[in-house]
């Protein structure tokens, strides 16, 4: 909620504006003011404004050109709105724009109030939070600007994610936009997108809290009508729905509930996205949706008929565990070849035998957007399972999957897509089956000879890594 502003105000329009003890350039500098700071005007002298800063609880003088006087009457509202419209898309001026937005909300009469100023202020707050998180070039002044907007009730949430600080706007004014009956379709859609960002979910939230958040996100996005949306916003909406339904599918699978319907909905929403509408600047949001949906795609698949003598079964272990047992159907009654338990989701539909039936690959998902590949194979006369991870760094987003097997060279074909240090990367690999050592790697499958001859037909048909 943006509080009321005092009367006879000036808004600072330049960063590092000096507040001095006397109305002259050589006077002692008391503090530096920032764009968006609101001051009460108490007089003028020799080209300086005599002001009082309630946020810092001190008075002083600043040069007249460093601030703009603003009126807060109904007659001043159109001019304030014009400035707000000019600043709302101006990067680097978020604090100033929010300050003018607060002044407009004070001046405009209640019957004339629309969703536009709330959407503008919320959008600038979100952009400022992204900059504070390090999304793009970060100005040294961003911390000061966060302090400026805090005086207007703009609250931020901060938490650590993968070794860096994530700052997110708490979304109060986006919720206000959704509650106003006169809000336009674009305003409502963009508010919903801001309130359902996956990177603004607390990574320390427990399973029950996370399920509640995903359900809220799902309901919020379902209430958005696509009629009247631009092509860009419509594709962003479908991409976000895909990521949310992927999260819902994973949560269902963790609870051992049917996850197929949610996974199929996620795939359907992803197919509705037109990547060309997003452009290069928003392509990362599409790739994010692809990776998250790709991680759970096996939930939508029907298990294939087993091939060869190897059989893999899953049973419940300790609370939250799934225990996998590998056996040889040609040796009934014999001891299992291998038994391994996991707290991840074992996608049994992904089980694929290869190497003349003497090896098996299985997709196992320990985290919502992180899927590994387990390879069961025989080495030196005993059976073992090796785990291939999407990446070697802290889990963010990614998946690795079986793409085929070249029997002549006994090479396993692997595809992986991973978010590494904020960038999405794709790799196609040939690995020796005996020890899973990397033989060759390329950014496209056609650059690897064995992919051209031995890639799995079902993988080629169903994978999302070739998007």
Image (spheres, rainbow, N blue to C red):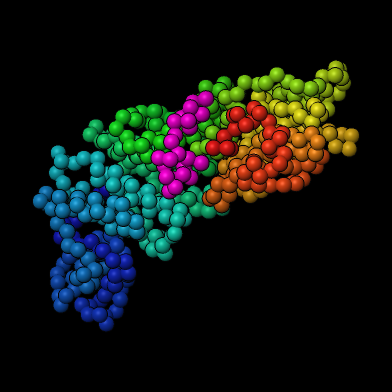
Asked if the stretch drawn in magenta spans residue 200, the answer is: no
What percent of the width, then of the height, locates residue 383? 83, 33
Quadrant including the C terminus: top right
Q: Which one is nearer the viewer's eye here, 356 or 437?
A: 356
Which quadrant holds residue 49?
bottom left
Asked if the stretch drawn in magenta spans residue 268, the answer is: yes
Q: Residue at x 81, y 21 (%)?
A: 309
Residue 466 located left or right of residue 183: right
Prevailing secondary structure of the magenta residues: helix
Q: Residue at x 35, y 39 (%)?
A: 190
Q: Which one is nearer the viewer's eye here, 372 or 250?
A: 372
Magenta stretch, residue numbers: 264-288
The number of numbered badges drawn on the structure is 0
**Among all residues in the image, which is located at the extreme top?**
332
Q: Which one is nearer the viewer's eye here, 237 or 428?
A: 428
The answer to whether one can see residue 300 in this image is yes
């Amino acid at each position: 909620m943006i509080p009321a502003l005092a009367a006879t105000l000036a808004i600072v329009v330049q960063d590092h504006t000096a507040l001095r003890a006397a109305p002259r350039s050589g006077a002692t500098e008391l503090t530096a003011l920032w764009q968006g700071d609101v001051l009460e005007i108490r007089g003028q002298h020799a080209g300086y404004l005599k002001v009082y800063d309630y946020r810092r609880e001190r008075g002083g003088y600043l040069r007249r050109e460093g601030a703009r006087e603003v009126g807060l009457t109904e007659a001043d509202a159109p001019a304030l709105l014009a400035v707000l419209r000019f600043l709302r898309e101006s990067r680097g001026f978020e604090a100033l724009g929010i300050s003018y937005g607060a002044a407009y909300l004070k001046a405009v009469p209640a019957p004339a109030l629309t969703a536009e100023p709330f959407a503008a202020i919320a959008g600038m707050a979100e952009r400022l939070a992204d900059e504070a998180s390090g999304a793009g070039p970060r100005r040294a002044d961003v911390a000061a600007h966060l302090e400026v907007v805090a005086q207007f009730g703009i609250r931020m949430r901060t938490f650590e994610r993968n070794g860096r600080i994530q700052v997110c706007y708490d979304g109060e004014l986006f919720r206000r936009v959704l509650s106003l009956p006169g809000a336009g379709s674009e305003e409502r859609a963009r508010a919903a997108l801001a309130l359902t960002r996956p990177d603004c979910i607390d990574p320390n939230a427990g399973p029950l809290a996370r399920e509640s958040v995903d359900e809220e996100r799902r309901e919020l996005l379902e209430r958005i009508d696509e009629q009247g949306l631009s092509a860009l916003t419509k594709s962003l909406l479908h991409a976000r729905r895909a990521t949310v339904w992927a999260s819902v599918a994973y949560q269902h699978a963790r609870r051992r509930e049917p996850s197929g319907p949610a996974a199929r909905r996620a795939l359907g929403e992803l197919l509705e996205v037109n990547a060309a509408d997003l452009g290069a600047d928003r392509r990362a949001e599409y790739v994010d949706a692809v990776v998250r949906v790709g991680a759970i795609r096996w939930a939508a698949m029907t298990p294939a008929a087993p091939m060869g003598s190897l059989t893999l079964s899953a049973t419940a272990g300790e609370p939250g565990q799934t225990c996998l047992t590998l056996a040889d159907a040609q040796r009934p009654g014999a001891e299992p070849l291998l038994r391994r338990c996991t707290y991840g989701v074992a996608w049994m539909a992904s089980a694929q035998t290869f190497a003349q039936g003497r090896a098996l690959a299985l997709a196992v998902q320990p985290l919502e957007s992180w899927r590994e590949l387990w390879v069961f194979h025989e080495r030196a006369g005993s059976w073992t399972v090796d785990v291939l991870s999407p990446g070697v760094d802290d889990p963010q987003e990614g998946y690795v999957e079986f793409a085929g097997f070249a029997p002549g060279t006994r090479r396993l074909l692997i595809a992986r897509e991973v978010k590494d240090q904020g960038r999405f990367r794709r790799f196609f690999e040939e690995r020796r089956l005996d020890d899973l050592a990397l033989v060759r790697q390329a950014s496209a499958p056609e650059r690897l000879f064995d992919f051209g001859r031995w890639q799995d037909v079902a993988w080629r048909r169903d994978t999302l890594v070739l998007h």
